[in-house]
Image (cartoon, rainbow, N blue to C red):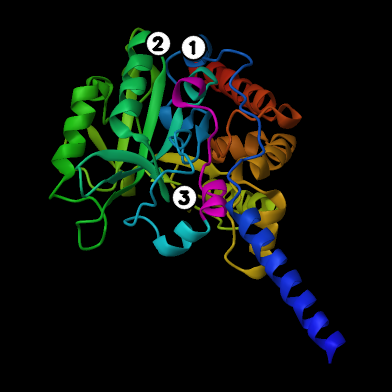
């Protein structure tokens, strides 16, 4: 009986130790991926590469998935409007944080690194009315990020930004989506920041780089939203972009998906007259194997380091012609020279595009 009690006590203590270890493991916040903000300066690559006649929707460019998440901290509140289970993301915050912060580099670094397409999520805080960049958790105030966009546009004539407000949340709305009630507040932020002074909403089927930049003498941005409030400076998301999400944590499945989309574009099933995005990202799966895979790769940026290197290995002109926007997590990752190699492939493609457009 004495041995039995000692065994039970040992097993209980072992279970408690494993439970505490698991809780600590889930709660650890660090990302285990380098902050790669150095390297080559691509601040003026569009002006230096493009000649004018190129259609905007055909120009290859780097894109950042959940672009404005560098300001996210472990202390950041969960955004109840944009997540299915705020409670779970609260109690497992270390894990949730590591799987939500997609970019380590801040916005000025992404812009200097050549990123021109930005996947943006924004949410309106119901208590304060302040808009924040978001991906499950609050990141920086959106006004700060818009000011950074405006500063770049003012300093870099000839560069074109695509600001894709992929999701705009509002917890006071019945469907948690930003609509007529508070859209005017977001529009005012865009206006006050100066971003709307560079915004254009041309016919994408015909719009060229030369037209929107006045021959490279001014910067431009195209702002996409699902609800535009009828504002003439904004492009309607539904009719302006094709960006299929593969929802997988398998690199091979992503690459197969990109092959499939390329065939759809080539066959005419997908229009070439819209922005077309390579969603080259891995997504944590809410299954036992998916959770284990996420824990094994530790964080979203760390997982992206290896994936981006593989993407650079297989990136090709067929994909770029079909889906010119290459959107990644941890977009400036230097692991495997991923960022440099992807930029080289993009610039080579655009140089050929510029040469072809000049002779048509």
* Rendered position, 108 above or below 183: above
Circles 2 and 1: CB atoms closer than 8 Å: yes
Q: Which mark is residue 44?
A: 1
Using the image as rendered, state which of residue 176 and residue 23 is in the foreground.
23
- Residue at figure coordinates x 46%, y 47% from the top left: 243
Question: Does label 2 or label 1 sit earlier along the sequence?
Answer: 1
Callout 1 secondary element:
loop
- Residue at figure coordinates x 72%, y 26% from the top left: 337
Question: Residue 123: in sight, yes or no?
Answer: yes
Q: Which residues are magenta?
A: 93-109
**Percent of width and height locating residue 74:** 49, 43
Using the image as rendered, state which of residue 26 and residue 104 is in the foreground.
26
* Rendered position, 80 above or below 8: above
**Percent of width and height locating residue 213:** 34, 15
Q: Is residue 155 left or right of residue 38?
A: left
Using the image as rendered, state which of residue 141 and residue 182 is in the foreground.
141
Asked if the stretch drawn in magenta spans residue 97, the answer is yes
Which residue was labeled with disc 2? Answer: 156
Which-is-in-front pick, marks 3 and 1? 1
Give the image quarter of residue 1.
bottom right
**Percent of width and height locating residue 61:** 52, 28
Distance between the alpha carbons at the discs numbered 3 and 1: 31 Å
Which-is-in-front pick, marks 2 and 3? 2
Q: Residues within 10 Å of mark 1 (few under 14, many from 20)?
A: some
Question: Residue 249: in sight, yes or no?
Answer: no
**Percent of width and height locating residue 109:** 51, 21
Which residue was labeled with disc 3? Answer: 270
Q: Residues within 10 Å of mark 2 (few under 14, many from 20)?
A: some
Callout 3 secondary element:
loop
> Given the current orientation, which residue lies at the most extreme front position?
2
């Amino acid at each position: 009986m004495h041995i039995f009690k000692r065994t039970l006590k040992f097993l209980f203590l072992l279970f408690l130790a494993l439970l505490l270890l698991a809780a600590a493991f889930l709660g650890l916040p660090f990302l285990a991926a380098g902050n790669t903000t150095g390297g080559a300066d691509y601040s003026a690559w569009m002006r230096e590469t493009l000649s004018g006649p190129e259609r905007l929707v055909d120009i290859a460019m780097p894109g950042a998935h959940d672009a404005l998440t560098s300001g996210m901290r472990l202390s950041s509140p969960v955004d109840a409007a944009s997540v299915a289970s705020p409670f779970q993301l609260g109690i497992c915050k270390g894990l949730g944080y590591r799987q939500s912060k997609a970019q380590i580099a801040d916005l000025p670094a992404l812009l200097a690194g050549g990123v021109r397409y930005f996947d943006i999520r924004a949410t309106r805080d119901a208590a304060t009315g302040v808009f924040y960049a978001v991906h499950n958790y609050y990141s920086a105030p959106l006004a700060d990020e818009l000011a950074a966009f405006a500063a770049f546009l003012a300093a870099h004539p000839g560069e074109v930004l695509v600001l894709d407000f992929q999701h705009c949340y509002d917890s006071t709305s019945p469907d948690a989506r930003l609509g007529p009630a508070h859209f005017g507040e977001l529009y005012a932020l865009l206006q006050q920041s100066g971003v709307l002074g560079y915004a254009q909403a041309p016919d994408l089927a015909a719009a060229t780089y030369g037209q929107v930049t006045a021959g490279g003498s001014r910067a431009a941005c195209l702002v996409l939203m699902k609800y535009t409030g009828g504002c003439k400076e904004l492009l309607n998301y539904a009719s302006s972009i094709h960006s299929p999400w593969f929802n997988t944590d398998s690199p091979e499945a992503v690459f197969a998906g990109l092959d499939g989309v390329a065939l759809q574009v080539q066959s005419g099933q997908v229009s070439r007259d819209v922005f077309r995005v390579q969603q080259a990202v891995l997504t944590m799966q809410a299954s036992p194997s998916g959770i284990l895979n996420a824990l094994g790769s530790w964080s979203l940026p760390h997982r992206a380091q290896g994936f981006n290197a593989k993407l650079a290995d297989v990136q090709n002109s067929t994909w770029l012609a079909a889906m010119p926007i290459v959107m990644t997590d941890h977009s400036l990752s230097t692991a495997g020279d991923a960022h440099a190699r992807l930029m080289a492939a993009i610039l080579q493609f655009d140089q050929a595009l510029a040469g072809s457009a000049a002779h048509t």
